[in-house]
Amino acid sequence: MSPRNKAHAGTRLRSQAHAFAALGDETRLALVVKLADGQPHSISRLTRCTRLTRQAVTKHLRVLESAGLVRNARAGRESLFEFNPQPILGLREYINLVSDEWDQGLARLRILVER
């Protein structure tokens, strides 16, 4: 692997790790679920029917935004947040890769055990 490809792979892994970490929090995961409806949401709309303050939601949204999972757009004086599915697709690719590697490893183990 060339140094450039290694650097790209390292950047990609860090990005995926950052997305996994962001989704590892129950509150942030719940926010992503709300935002995944395809509609932009204001902070006040996201705090409805929760015990969270606007400040807490804002803090969680900033973490999701830094992981690339959420985009922020201004509409007048209001910030609207939208879900960005791209990082999830990258996570899915990674999980499929790891799953395939496990399947291959287990198949090799099965061959050894059944001999």
Image (tube, helix red, strand yellow):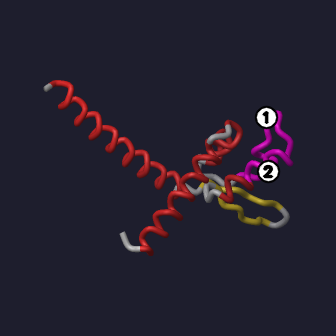
* Amino acid type, callout 2: Lys
Magenta stretch: includes residue 56: yes
Mark count: 2
Q: Quick one: label 2, few (<14), some, or many (20+) residues within 10 Å?
A: few
* Amino acid type, callout 1: Thr
Local secondary structure at mark 1: loop
| Gap in angstroms between the C-alphas marked 1 and 2 | 15 Å
Image position of 21 with respect to 80: above or below: above
- Kindly check if marks 1 and 2 are in contact, taking CB atoms under 8 A apart as contact: no
Is 32 left, or right, of 51 in this rendering? left
Q: Which mark is residue 50?
A: 1
Given residues 37 and 67, the one toward you in this image is 67
Q: Which residues are magenta?
A: 41-61
Secondary structure mostly seen in the magenta stretch: helix
Residue at 67%, 40% in the rendered image: 25
Residue at 33%, 44% in the rendered image: 101
Given residues 64 and 40, the one toward you in this image is 64
Residue pointed to by mark 2:
59
